[in-house]
Image (cartoon, rainbow, N blue to C red):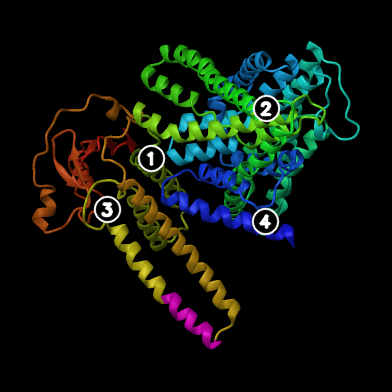
């Protein structure tokens, strides 16, 4: 009963605090961390101890797996150099730097000081993802931070185990048969090789086995349940062969996420996304609440130790400063060297500065500190140092990152540019689908005409997110009208249900179908609003995809200042305006009733038009259906 009550209180606290943080635009992890710290000093609040096994075997695998599922394998491959440099090189560099600081301030051996460095070195996957998502970092920075935080735990844990062995200690959660190994350069290299390659091989094997099972597993609920088991299977299997469970989980998650469109049915993918989103929300935020709840008990342990609390805090602040300084010292020289050889040196340097300040620590740092053996010299103080580094980086970097992004003018993905690219991609996909059915001589002409109309409407809905028109677009009119209909239809179904005149299973099936349609319409409205709320600015240049766009655009002016002349003559209302780059003719877009821009292309053969909407500088080639 006590356990159930505790879990319920944690879940409700997470939900309420996260909602309040959203209202005041405060990152939820920071708010929950503060609530946890305050609650740890409140009399009557039970002490919740984070055991290393709970974190390393219970919390870490699902959090890593959820992050890996949502991380692009293609993007990881494209940035593998920087990611490995941070997840391996920076971890060891930070561990060494912290070891020098700690050994100078504390009466401990250098191997134990290096163990402390390995504990505080790796930024946390949950913290990096949560803060990056909250403030909207550019995608390349986010990919590198996520890739780093997914892989660096393996380096840190192997370094910790090696350092403890060199200090004559056995890691705390190794079990009763733990023993101290002899450390040499060869043994260190062997440990890293087994951890990396063994973990990757285990993760790949889990991916292959799960992929085979999914080909014969057609039940959506069973497929989702299998997904919940994957991270624990991968982690435990890798640890059993002394490989890295972290790498095994990440590799399995990356490949299963990449191959999901092939291995899973659409209902299974949707169910997996929805269920993992709920689980991730609770676990991510509960982790920071639990970290804060450790504060009072850790301080009590330090007061009972050999060093004073004041000295312990000063050492923790010194280690925190070292962590904050060492990351830029490692990243900025490499960023500068890379920027000099590229055409966007200024952008890369600004991104490098942001990345060098995005090293928030999290639950793995605290869990690794708790794995220190009970006979470790000054163990309570070392755990406090780990907590100070975790809380300090979350607070200092978490609060200052948005300000730094504004100062350096580093922006996240532009929703307008995303909408442009999405319209091109959806148009290309729709074209491929239409060509497939047009090639079938048995396709019904009426069905073909309907599908063509629906495909055009689907593409036009994306184009309509752009522009600055004050009037309602056709897709917005349809969405509003259909949502009104759905509300009336649902009311009638609920009336039928109350009278028990129709079988309840039939009514439930109809209601579920209606919910799916309403969810799709509401999601589309949210995306459209997000685009409209962004500042009106020209999007970054999109790579030209055809000769017409690559050629120098003509310097022409609109042939009419009043809008689309054909619409004015016919008494029609346009949605967006386009201009021919060849002659300056102004016409309306394909979402408008007249579609006069496309008509001008068919009449004149002029291939390229551009947007005449404020703040939009993109062009479109009618011939090659390419964006530039």
How far apart in space, not on screen, are marks 3 and 1 (Cα)? 19 Å
Marks 2, 3: nearer the viewer: 2
Q: Residue at x 65, y 30 (%)?
A: 309
Q: Residue at x 48, y 35 (%)?
A: 398
Say few, some or many: other residues with alpha carbon within 10 Å of mark 4 (under 14 / 14 to 19 / 20 or more).
Answer: few
Marks 3, 1: nearer the viewer: 1
Q: Is residue 267 visible?
A: no
Q: Nearer the viewer, residue 421 or 185?
A: 185
Q: Mark 4 falls on what kind of element?
A: helix
Say few, some or many: other residues with alpha carbon within 10 Å of mark 3 (under 14 / 14 to 19 / 20 or more).
Answer: many
How far apart in space, not on screen, are marks 4 and 2 (Cα)? 35 Å
Q: Which mark is residue 7?
A: 4
Q: Are marks 4 and 1 in contact (CB under 8 Å)?
A: no
Marks 4, 3: nearer the viewer: 4
Residue located beneath label 3 in the image: 591
- Residue span colored magenta: 489-501
Q: Mark 2 falls on what kind of element?
A: loop
* Image position of 74 with respect to 515: above or below: above
**491 inside magenta stretch:** yes
Q: Mark 3 falls on what kind of element?
A: loop
Tell me the quadrant of the picture where the C terminus can be found.
Answer: top left
* Image position of 614 with respect to 77: above or below: below
């Amino acid at each position: 009963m006590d356990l159930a009550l505790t879990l319920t209180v944690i879940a409700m606290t997470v939900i309420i605090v996260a909602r309040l943080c959203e209202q005041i635009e405060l990152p939820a992890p920071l708010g929950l961390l503060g609530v946890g710290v305050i609650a740890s000093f409140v009399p009557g609040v039970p002490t919740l101890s984070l055991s290393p096994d709970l974190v390393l075997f219970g919390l870490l695998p699902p959090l890593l797996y959820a992050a890996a599922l949502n991380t692009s394998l293609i993007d990881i491959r494209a940035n593998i150099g920087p990611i490995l440099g941070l997840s391996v090189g920076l971890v060891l560099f930070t561990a060494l730097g912290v070891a020098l600081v700690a050994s100078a301030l504390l009466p401990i051996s250098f191997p134990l000081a290096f163990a402390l460095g390995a504990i505080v070195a790796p930024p946390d996957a949950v913290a990096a993802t949560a803060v990056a998502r909250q403030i909207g970092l550019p995608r390349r920075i986010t990919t590198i931070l996520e890739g780093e935080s997914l892989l660096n735990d393996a380096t840190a844990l192997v370094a910790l185990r090696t350092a403890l062995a060199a200090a004559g200690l056995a890691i705390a959660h190794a079990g009763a048969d733990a023993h101290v190994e002899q450390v040499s350069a060869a043994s260190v290299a062997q440990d890293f090789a087994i951890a990396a390659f063994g973990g990757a091989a285990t993760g790949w094997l889990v991916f292959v086995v799960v992929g085979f099972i999914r080909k014969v597993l057609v039940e959506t609920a069973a497929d989702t349940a299998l997904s919940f088991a994957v991270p624990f299977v991968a982690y435990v299997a890798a640890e059993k062969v002394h490989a890295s469970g972290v790498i095994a989980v990440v590799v399995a998650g990356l490949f299963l996420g990449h191959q999901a469109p092939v291995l899973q049915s659409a209902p299974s993918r949707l169910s997996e996304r929805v269920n993992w989103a709920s689980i991730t929300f609770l676990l991510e935020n509960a982790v920071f609440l639990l970290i804060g709840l450790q504060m009072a008990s850790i301080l009590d342990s330090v007061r009972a130790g050999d060093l004073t609390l004041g000295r312990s805090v000063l050492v923790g602040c010194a280690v925190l400063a070292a962590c904050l300084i060492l990351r830029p010292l490692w990243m900025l020289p490499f960023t500068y060297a890379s920027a000099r050889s590229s055409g966007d040196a200024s952008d890369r340097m600004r991104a490098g500065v942001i990345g060098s300040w995005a090293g928030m620590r999290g639950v793995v740092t605290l869990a690794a500190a708790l794995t220190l053996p009970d006979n470790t010299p000054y163990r309570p103080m070392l755990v406090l140092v780990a907590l100070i580094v975790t809380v300090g980086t979350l607070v200092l970097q978490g609060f200052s990152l948005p300000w730094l992004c504004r100062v350096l003018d580093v922006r996240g993905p532009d929703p307008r540019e995303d909408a442009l690219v999405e319209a091109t991609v959806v148009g290309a996909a729709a074209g491929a689908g239409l060509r497939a059915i047009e090639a079938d001589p048995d396709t019904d002409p009426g069905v073909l005409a309907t599908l063509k109309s629906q495909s055009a409407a689907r593409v036009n809905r994306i184009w309509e997110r752009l522009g600055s028109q004050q009037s309602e677009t056709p897709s917005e009119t349809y969405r509003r009208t259909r949502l009104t209909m759905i509300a009336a239809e649902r009311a009638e179904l609920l009336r039928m249900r109350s009278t028990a005149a129709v079988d309840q299973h039939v009514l439930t099936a109809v209601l579920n179908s209606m919910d799916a349609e309403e969810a799709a319409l509401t999601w589309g409205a949210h995306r459209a609003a997000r685009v409209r709320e962004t500042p009106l600015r020209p999007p970054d240049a999109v790579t030209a995809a055809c000769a017409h766009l690559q050629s120098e655009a003509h310097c022409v002016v609109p042939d009419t200042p009043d809008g689309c002349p054909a619409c004015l003559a016919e008494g029609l209302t346009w949605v967006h305006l386009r201009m021919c780059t060849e002659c300056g003719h102004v016409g309306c877009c394909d979402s408008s009733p007249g579609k006069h821009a496309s008509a001008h292309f068919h009449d004149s053969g002029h291939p390229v038009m551009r947007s005449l909407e404020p703040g939009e500088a993109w062009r479109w080639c009618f011939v090659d259906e390419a964006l530039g």
